[in-house]
Amino acid sequence: MERRDFLKAVGFGTATMALSGCANATQRIRFGANRKKPNIVYIIADDLGYAEVGCYGQKKIKTPNIDKLASQGMKFTQHYSGNPVCAPSRCVLMTGKHSGHSQVRGNKQVGGNEGWKLGATTGGQWPLKAGTITVAKILKDAGYRTGAFGKWGLGRVGTTGDPNKQGFDHFFGYICQRQAHTYYPNHLWRDGKVQWLEGNKDGKEQDYSHDLIANEALKFIKTYRGKPFFLYVPFTIPHVALQVPEDSLAEYKGKWPDPPYTGDKGYFPHQNPRACYAAMVTRMDRDVGRIMSLLKDLNLEDNTIVMFTSDNGPTFNGGSDSAFFESARPLRGLKGSVYEGGIRVPFIVRWPGKIKAASTSEHICAFWDFLPTCCDTLGVDAPGDIDGISILPTLLGKPGKQKKHKYLYWELRGRQGVRMGKWKAVRTNPNQKIQLYDLNKDIGEQNDVADANPKITAKMAELMITARTKSDVFPLPRPKS
């Protein structure tokens, strides 16, 4: 949707009005002079599996702060990421469009293929277009200060996808996803400019990027405590590489026997990979706790919506051990897969006084619901061409008023997945017969019932055609004749 179409859709004036001039958006907000608009904090882990936190069944890795968040809010058991991999999942989150309609449908590298190298500042992923309506732009025009701290992956600096051009007042972290394969880079980005990290030059490992990012997120809260703010925290943990400071590693070191160390495979695997992986997740959990403690100390927690999730399922490389941690249990598949293990993710929402503590929801929802939920919360109209549906009724304990998706859709490099009620269809390549699963009976997607349900299978096949639009940049391969 372009700017003029968005303005028409939400009634903000003529089609020629600039988006930045939408100050009248506040006229549509349901908040009176004596009621503050809620702050919104959205924390997203990178490659964290459905069962890698305690409140979702993890037994080996300690996540007390995330577990506490669930005990104080609502835990969703059927929430889905935007895509099985990083960049397209984040695009879906920002725009409210599923991966059959979104601009970014894969991890497409642009600006050179050296973004993973220390010192390379030209790499990045396929950029969001100019005029894209993002959740950050909508909230900014509603009077919010907006900040993103972590991994971006939706366009390098200097392109239309630069986060500072997509609605964020402030950004600090990794612009290019490939560079985020080390936690000791020699630079990060701050609002369009390179910030060199002196502690990581000449082979030194002193500045742990996750800590720097977490500190910037806390600083943002302190700076804008008196104004409504949208804090987007796309942490890089537990994405490979396996790297963590010794003070975190000590908690797990020697706890389990590790597989043999095989040396550097390109992602710098740790000599104690299982201990390192668990320590990384627990360190991230610590910083979730730091964010929550700061909100409490500043008397902001009652008027702040906090959401926690993951961008896709757990990974399979770089020394990680998803089988050992049962990272996706009881689901099938890992990152990159359109089976449940690649896309079903933890999702927790806390809003004291509004969301019932220690509640659980089986409502089927996905990343593309975040944008309309924000709009619904503020009482502004969402863009008319999105795929998302607000989950605010569910959050407020009004399931009878909750609209439901007719279906959910994902695609990635020829793989397609569709969920329609209890039914889940998967096609892992265009020439493969569609697989059909009844998730009510078979959450692990082990028993293909396509032949026994021809009408449902035919409907799923139709959706795999009609639920998407053509993308020249991210084409869906045609079946071979």
Image (cartoon, grey):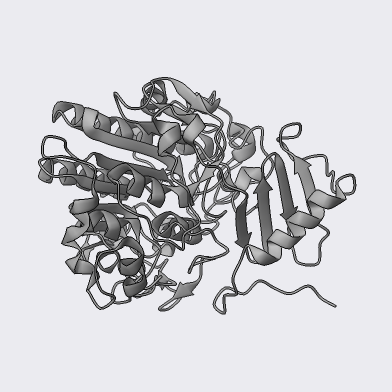
Across and down, in percent, residue 103 comes to 48, 69
Q: Residue at x 26, y 69 (%)?
A: 165
**Front residue (pair 41, 387):** 387
Q: Which quadrant of the structure image shows residue 170?
A: bottom left
**Front residue (pair 45, 451):** 451
Across and down, in percent, residue 289 comes to 30, 30
Q: Would you place residue 132 above or below residue 225 in this image?
A: below
Q: Residue at x 61, y 47 (%)?
A: 342
Q: Quadrant of the C terminus?
A: bottom right
Q: Please give left or right for residue 66 compared with residue 34 in the image.
A: right
Q: Which quadrant of the structure image shows residue 390?
A: top left
**Front residue (pair 62, 400):** 400
Across and down, in percent, residue 191 comes to 20, 64
Q: Would you place residue 245 above or below residue 433 in this image?
A: above
Count of residue discs: 0
Q: Residue at x 41, y 70 (%)?
A: 1
Q: Residue at x 15, y 28 (%)?
A: 299
Across and down, in percent, residue 478 comes to 74, 74
Q: Would you place residue 2 above or below residue 263 in this image?
A: below
Any part of residue 429 in sight: yes
Any part of residue 254 in sight: no
Q: Which quadrant of the structure image shows residue 118?
A: bottom left
